[in-house]
Amino acid sequence: MAIRAGRTPRSTFTILSALIIDGPMCPKELSVKLDMAPRTVSFALKQLLSKKILRRIPNLHDMRRPKYHVNMDQARSLLERYKDTPYVSSIPPMAWHKMM
């Protein structure tokens, strides 16, 4: 079952876009970079992890703060499916370019 745009907050697609463009980040970095509440970031990460779009990787500098990495194949299929929706159409072209 894929994430459906109608039931997925815009923040989920914003976080996915940031991870595609800037690479793996921990929740705190995402929260600061995107000016989002930590709870919002946590909720979006849990959704993306449950659908295997993200994977958690250890942060060798601080094991208490894992980083999240995008599974490009899963992300590509999700974004292609919803590319005409307002959520995904706001993703910058740079993110699309990095996925190809």
Image (cartoon, helix red, strand yellow):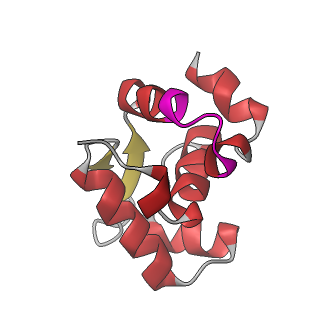
Residue 49 in view, yes or no: yes
Q: Nearer the viewer, residue 20 or 44?
A: 44
Q: Nearer the viewer, residue 38 or 74?
A: 74
The image quadrant that residue 65 belongs to is: bottom left
Percent across and percent down for residue 90 are 74, 47
As drawn, 22 above or below 37 = above
User: Residue at the spot x=66%, y=27% of the render?
Assistant: 96
Percent across and percent down for residue 86 are 69, 50
User: How many badges with numbers are in the image?
Assistant: 0
Q: Nearer the viewer, residue 37 or 64?
A: 37
In the rendered image, the quadrant that contains the N terminus is: top left
User: Residue at the spot x=63%, y=52% of the render?
Assistant: 87
Residue 59 in view, yes or no: no
Q: Is 65 within the magenta?
A: no
Q: Nearer the viewer, residue 47 or 81?
A: 81
**Left or right: residue 63 compared with residue 39:** left
As drawn, 63 above or below 96 = below
Percent across and percent down for residue 70 are 42, 39
As drawn, 42 above or below 90 = below
**Left or right: residue 1 compared with residue 31:** left
User: Residue at the spot x=38%, y=73% of the render?
Assistant: 43
Q: Which residues are magenta?
A: 79-86
Percent across and percent down for residue 59 are 35, 56
Q: Is 85 within the magenta?
A: yes
Q: Residue furthest top?
A: 100
As drawn, 44 above or below 23 = below
Q: Residue furthest front?
A: 6
